[in-house]
Amino acid sequence: MTNLKLGEDPSLQQESPCPPGCCIVFDNPLRRLVQNPIKILKPYIKPGWTILDVGPGMGYYTIALAGLAGEKGKVIAADLQTPMLEGIRRRAEKAGVAGRIKLHQAMPHKIGVNEPVDFCLAFWMVHEVPDRQRFLGEIVSLLTPGGLFLFAEPKIHVTKAIYNASLDILKRLGMTVINEPKIFISYAAVLKK
């Protein structure tokens, strides 16, 4: 975590991307007891949709999204770290959904996806982004009219003020909060374009 300097906006606090070694904590069968990806995502996904999973780590939610998108749907897994994308590839092949997942190497200051998406998931990662205004603006620009964005941050790591600052950015970008799902140890909102 970078230390804030006098006068800096705490909503711009930045973290380094989560290293691959942390994924055993985030991506294990016990997590499904408190954060079941199907239960969390199913109310918001329609078969055939194009979905962006930004900062997916090893694909804890990506694999579930691919199942919910169905055979005609597509999930774009966009991450900075090649080892994370390789982990998703292996897990998708094992789960039989590799054909529905497009792996995308994001850049440090740009997601770089060039196609519209119906749904975007940013789970426990927005606080790691150095320029949230630009990052969230890019997500909003990718969403189709009526597209949905599920944004969640960890309560154990992100303050309510930082979460609310990101939520305020999204509202200024024209997004409307339609739900605030209860997700274990998370601040979360589903927003509509």
Image (cartoon, rainbow, N blue to C red):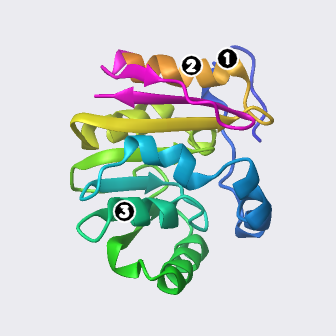
Depth-wise, is mark 3 or mark 2 nearer the camera? 3
Q: Is residue 180 magenta?
A: yes
Query: Does residue 147 sit above or below 29 in this rendering?
Result: above
- Which quadrant, please, contains the C terminus? top left
In the picture, measured across the screen, residue 83 lies left or right of residue 92, that is: right
Q: Are marks 3 and 2 in contact (CB under 8 Å)?
A: no
Q: Distance between the Cα atoms at labels 3 and 1?
A: 30 Å
Q: How many marks?
A: 3
Query: Does residue 148 sit above or below 189 in this rendering?
Result: below
In front: 36, or 109? 36
The residue indicated by pointer 2 is 165
- Residue at x 51%, y 36% (from the top left corner): 151
In front: 78, or 46? 46
Amino acid on which disc 2 is placed: Ala
In the picture, measured across the screen, residue 30 lies left or right of residue 91, that is: right
Amino acid on which disc 1 is placed: Ala
The residue indicated by pointer 1 is 161
User: Where in the figure is residue 93, as x and y percent of width and height?
Assistant: 48, 85
Q: Residues within 10 Å of mark 3 (few under 14, many from 20)?
A: many
In the picture, measured across the screen, residue 90 lies left or right of residue 3, that is: left
The residue indicated by pointer 3 is 76
Q: Are marks 1 and 2 in contact (CB under 8 Å)?
A: yes
> Does label 3 or label 1 sit earlier along the sequence?
3
Q: Distance between the Cα atoms at labels 3 and 2?
A: 26 Å
Q: Which residues are magenta?
A: 172-193
